[in-house]
Amino acid sequence: MLNIESIRTGTLTWLRDFWERWRGPIVATVVVIVLGYLAFRYADDFIGTLSTNKETSRRIAATIVFVFSLFALGLIVTFFWLFRGIKADEEKLDAIITYCYAFIVFSLLASVLPFISLPLIPQLYDSMTKSPIGIVAGCSVAQGAVRKPAAGASEDASPREDDRSVPRELRCDNNSDQWVVNIGGTIADSTNPQEYRLVQISGGLVVPLYAVVLSLMGAAVSMTRRVPEFQRRISPGDPEYLTYDQAREGLVFQIMQVASAPLIAITAYYLVDPGSRASTIVLSFASGFSSETVLLLIRAVLEKMRPNAQAPAAKNTAVRVAPVLLDFGDVKAGGSLRKSVSITNPGPAALVVSALACSGEFSPATQVPFSVAPQSSSAIEIDFSPTSAAAKRGQLTVTDNATGSPRTVELTGNGMA
């Protein structure tokens, strides 16, 4: 005979487990469906309003630029708040990882913002033509070329000599008008400053806008691949385990490689001078995607160029705490296990350990202060007392009177039911 109550309880339990496991994709799917319906239903009316009402278009674009600027300001302030201090802990590293994902979104938004704001805000375009750094539509005049005169004249901007200071794709004599990023170039004044117009740029550094956009996208894709890798490597038991401090250093480098991707792409563009847009597309995206490798290569070259430091006359006297990762293994929840690390004093004077501190469900068992005699070692004992069945992480901080203090040891263990 069927037990209706048992079936009902089992069904509710299954639905609850299903929701707990799949609620993220379900919510995302519902949001996409709703946004898709709204776009399908109201897109024509919205685009029609934008095309007929320039003031509405300008306000929408200005709002987008304002919100994006607030987003950028928030990222800058948060960057200095997150990366302050010397040591990283689990809570701070979780916040840094969240920040990295927000920075990826910001980079992708930055790559498409010019295409939204510039066509809809004529005043913004006018300020770009007068600024030392701006995004404009036009071409670049090679050195030794004659600037194109006013309409009706016969002389054009053809070079008087074979000049290679401007890439072929950007030269005005090749009829290559396009959206470009102008850095330090000069633009002739226009009698109609509020209208969209093509310009000619003399001097400075000019690069196609789409090359910068693709480099940002490539760097963001690379960062999207690397951040989850850092998340995996800080998990207990991973063969490529990273400490919190090492993970923070790596994540900062990921942010910097995205920020430097446009510079690397511009440098590669001028070095290679691609003769076709297909070559520029490949070069730009590859420069952004491989910006981390390029920065590591530059750092390695600079390290080799540094003068070799003289070897110290005395032996290394740095205090050492080992191991740097202490794994307690499986411990029953509610129970306790004690293990120890060794602190070695290779110096000529006594080492005084003044404080011990542990985070997570770990606690120091050794009383402080205590001293370590010269040329000897001492044990520091730690207790692991899990309160639930789950993987646990923590950190031991050792404070002493020697250079390099405080010192840290990563602590891991598994609470078992």
Image (tube, helix red, strand yellow):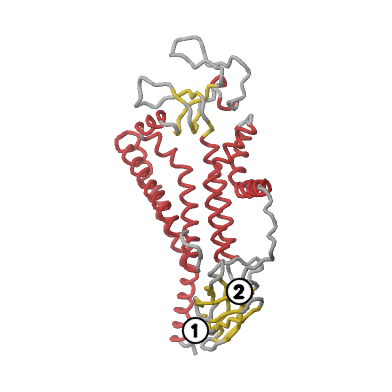
Indicate left or right for 80 with 364 as reference. left
In the displayed structure, 219 sits above or below 129; it is below
Whole-percent x, y for residue 207 in the image: 54, 32
Res 143 visible: yes
Please tell me whether mark 2 or mark 1 is closer to you in this view: 2
Q: Which residue is mark 2?
A: 349
Residue drawn at (63%, 69%) of the image: 238
Residue 229 found in image quarter: bottom right
Q: Quadrant of the C terminus?
A: bottom right
In the displayed structure, 314 sits above or below 10; it is above
Whole-percent x, y for residue 270 in the image: 60, 32
Q: In the image shown, does 95 or 341 lie closer to the viewer? A: 341
Res 45 visible: no
Whole-percent x, y for residue 2 in the image: 48, 87
Q: In the image shown, does 206 or 203 lie closer to the viewer? A: 203
Residue drawn at (43%, 62%) of the image: 27
Q: Amino acid at mark 1?
A: Thr
- SS at badge 1: loop
Q: Which residue is mark 1?
A: 387
On residue 226, the disc is: none
Indicate left or right for 238 with 129 as reference. right
- SS at badge 2: loop
Alpha carbon separation for disc pair 2 and 1: 41 Å
Q: Amino acid at mark 2?
A: Ala
